[in-house]
Image (tube, grey):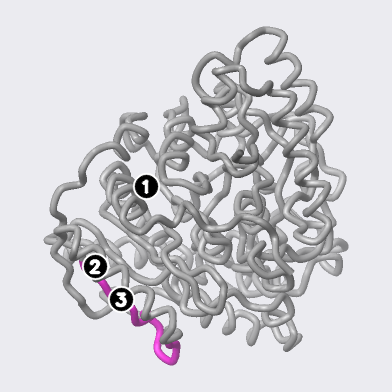
Amino acid sequence: MTALHELDAHDLAAALRRHEVSAAEVVAHQADRIAAHDTDLRAFLTPTIDAALEQAAAIDDSGDAEGGFTGVPIAVKDLTSTAGVRTTLGSTLLADSVPDVDAHVVRLVREAGLVSLGKTNTPEFGLSSYTDNDVLGATSTPWRLGLNAGGSSGGAAAAVAAGLVPWALGSDGGGSIRIPSSCCGVVGFKPTRGRISPGPVGSDWNGLASDGPIARTVRDAAALLDVLAVPQLGDARYVGGSGGFAEAVRQDPGALRIAAWADPYLPGIETDPRIRAVWEDALRLLASLGHEVHIVENPFPPELEPQFNVVWSSGMAAAPIPPEAEPLLRQNTRYWRERGSRHSAAELAGAMQFLETTTRQVLTGLGSYDVFLTPTLAMLPRPHAWFTESDDPVEAHRRELLFTPFTAVYNMAGIPAASVPFGQVDGLPVGVMLGAHQGSDALLLSLMAQLEAAAGWSTLPIDPRG
């Protein structure tokens, strides 16, 4: 018999509707999973099991688990505001911070009947491509304890991969959904800029970041996107329309033109040949499915990177942190704050304009293609200390670029992108990344579902391993 934690959200919802299991039993089972495995994984920064059991009992008493995903557990990244539940942003400065307002995505999840089991781990202020902080520590990929889950949604991806929850909320400003999804062997989707509201108190002032789903199956990711992609009053970036993503995974994407590259856009960085081999396997499978695949040179120029860093660091420099608190910040955070403080308003405006005009030119040049395919990462999951052992923030940043040179350009361009698990190297998961033009989220999900059906990655193991 399939254990509850092995079911995806769809199958778990179906079991709840058939009254094969109660919402309280589901939460209790997942709580036992967390108790058994999370001491080693460190996926959850703030579990909310008592509140989840109370919500589940209310669902059972009311009989509400008769439709949709009511009663299905979920987890929320600790960068996301949750009323009455501490939101630390991975920083000791906010270790006791309890917001009085929910982010729209949290409200939408609750209104859909999902039951949050708590807040998942993230690096301080979500700044790094690995998950480690001074509040909880480092999060491991369930595939091999001691190797980092990736960041900044590392706790969310690890929780999903380990069967602690079937899906989770992540966020992505430079790859932060897709990086840990590759490290943990799950599906991570970053939607088109403006698809999901950052409100009511959040801000996507630079156009880089978006919330998005992390799940074990494409159909779950699409269904959660339907829950999240609801326009809200006051949104500054409005894509238009909502819903229909769950339906898209049941549609044939048709024959698509796919541009593919496996070389990073930054000089001096190379893709691990074993990862390149997985990418080549994906090329062959897509071609066998009737798609027209063309290998092209990486179209994004390296000049994007320094301008991206101006925008990235300026945002951190603007954070309202008093000078006396600076020594309490992690070295990586201080590095980005100091770097951002050097830039003038004119330099920031120039950098933002450069990102917009340059990525527009690139996408115009790719106009004859429907989808783009690259590796998600250039390296396999790394040991926790690999990112920080030099004690030099410049070297630490260089190592992050060696690790993840593919993801950030999709944030600069504001287009949808997803990491899907496609292979294994030395017993570790390897993801490939699919991107598409602005607004083509449904098409991308349709192709992802086709690839999932052909490759069968949803059968990958989900038990934490030492």
Q: Position of residue 194 (x, y in %)?
A: 40, 42
On the image, the x and y values in percent for residue 159 come to 66, 51
The image quarter containing residue 237 is: top left
Q: Please say whether residue 332 is one of the residues in the magenta stretch.
A: no
Distance CA(mark 2)–CA(mark 1): 16 Å
Q: Residue at x 78, y 54 (%)?
A: 37
First reached walking from the N terminus: tag 3 or tag 2: 3
Crowding around mark 1 (Cα neighbors within 10 Å: few <14, some 14 to 19, many 20+) is many
The type of residue carrying mark 3 is: Glu
Residue bounds of the magenta highlight: 259-270
Under mark 2, the amino acid is Val
Say which element carries label 1. loop
- Name the magenta segment's main secondary structure: loop
Q: Tell whether 332 sits left or right of 298.
A: right
Give the residue type that dot 1 points to.
Thr
The N terminus is located in which quarter? top right
The residue indicated by pointer 1 is: 192
**Residue 327, quarter of the rendered image:** bottom right
Q: CA distance from mark 3 to mark 2?
A: 23 Å
As drawn, 427 above or below 312: below
Secondary structure under tag 3 reads helix
Which part of the image, by quadrant, shows the C terminus? bottom right
- Whether tag 3 and tag 2 are in contact, CB under 8 A, the answer is no
Q: Which residue is mark 3?
A: 280
Residue 452 pos. (x, y %)? 36, 53
The residue that disc 2 covers is 362
Q: Which numbered mark, 3 or 1, is in the foreground of this view?
A: 3
Is 451 in front, or is 411?
451
